[in-house]
């Protein structure tokens, strides 16, 4: 079964450092997402991406965050200057059609620890 | 607004007992999805409900969508230790908006 893959699985970084989380969505999917989950809390939407541009973003997704699809397969989330409160599990997700008609598939997540 | 409220936050049951989690919205939902997240894992899609009053079953799991399309429930009959995890409802309109989740623990 096709799956969304994410790297790294776990990253520890110093506060203020830049972090790039990488994702390879399912190959025929067109809509890409980043979600985050602080330990013990619910999954929160960060950003959606379609046709090489951000289609929607949440209040969490401020200027320190950016996303990019540098080639035909990767989808990255960059955090420019990490803060302690950025420590969370970051999930990449994808689906192949718009609207509410299709399943969103999640990757296994990248656990970010900011120290 | 777009939030979905989910209760209870935690549920501890003895293996073999039933379990139910409830999801509520103040506004009408076009659909409701349910996900399961095992401890340390990622959300895995279980089902989507679209129609008013819809009921769907997956083995021991029964999913319901309210007549007014403002609430939904997931019921597990005769829980097993493999049912352990957090169950989230989510509304989808492009992006997913998750409820807070119900963490289920099952004592053997």
Image (spheres, helix red, strand yellow):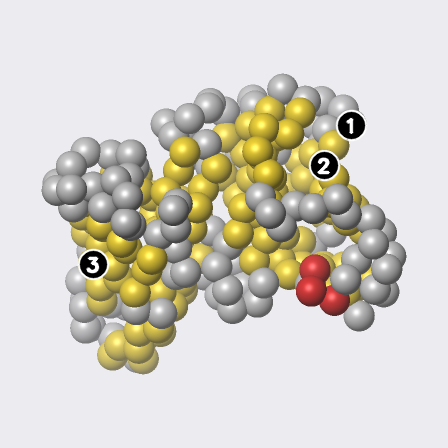
For the point 83% across and 54% down, the residue is A81
Circle 2 or circle 3, nearest the eye: 2
Q: Label 3: chain?
A: B
Q: Is residue B35 visible?
A: no
| Relative to B13, A28 lies left or right | right
For the point 67% across and 25% down, the residue is A53
Front in this rendered view, residue B61 or B100: B100
**Residue A13 x/y as whole percent:** 82, 62
Q: Secondary structure at mark 1?
A: loop
The answer to which quarter of the image holds residue A77 is top right
> Do badges 1 and 2 share one subunit?
yes
**Residue B71 x/y as whole percent:** 22, 50
Front in this rendered view, residue A51 or B27: B27
Give the labeled residue for mark 1. A70
The answer to which quarter of the image holds residue B18 is bottom left
**Residue A6 x/y as whole percent:** 67, 45
Q: Which mark is residue B75?
A: 3
| Relative to A99, A110 lies left or right | right
> Do badges 2 and 3 share one subunit?
no
> Do badges 3 and 1 share one subunit?
no
Mark 2 burial class by Cα count in 10 Å: few <14, some 14-19, many 20+: many
**Residue B106 x/y as whole percent:** 32, 74
Q: Label 2: chain?
A: A
Q: Secondary structure at mark 2?
A: strand
Marks 3/1: CA–CA distance: 43 Å
For the point 52% across and 58% down, the residue is B41
Tell me if label 1 and label 2 are in contact, CB under 8 Å.
no
Give the labeled residue for mark 2. A67
Circle 1 or circle 2, nearest the eye: 2
């Amino acid at each position: 079964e096709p799956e969304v893959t994410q790297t790294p699985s776990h990253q520890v970084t110093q506060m203020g450092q830049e972090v790039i989380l990488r994702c390879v969505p399912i190959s025929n999917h067109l809509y890409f997402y980043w979600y985050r989950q602080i330990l013990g809390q619910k999954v929160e939407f960060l950003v959606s991406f379609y046709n090489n541009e951000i289609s929607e973003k949440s209040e969490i997704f401020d200027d320190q965050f950016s996303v990019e699809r540098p080639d035909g397969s990767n989808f990255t989330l960059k955090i420019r200057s990490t803060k302690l409160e950025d420590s969370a599990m970051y999930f990449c997700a994808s689906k192949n059609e718009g609207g509410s008609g299709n399943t969103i598939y999640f990757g296994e997540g990248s656990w970010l620890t900011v120290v | 607004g777009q939030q979905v409220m989910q209760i209870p936050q935690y549920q501890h049951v003895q293996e073999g007992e039933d379990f139910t989690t409830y999801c509520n919205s103040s506004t009408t939902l076009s659909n409701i999805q349910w996900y399961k997240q095992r401890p340390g894992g990622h959300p895995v899609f279980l089902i989507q409900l679209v129609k008013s009053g819809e009921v769907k079953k997956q083995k021991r799991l029964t999913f319901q969508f309210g007549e007014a399309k403002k609430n939904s429930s997931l019921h597990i009959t005769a829980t097993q230790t493999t049912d352990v995890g957090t169950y989230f409802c989510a509304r989808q309109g492009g992006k997913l908006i998750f409820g807070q989740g119900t963490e289920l623990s099952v004592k053997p």
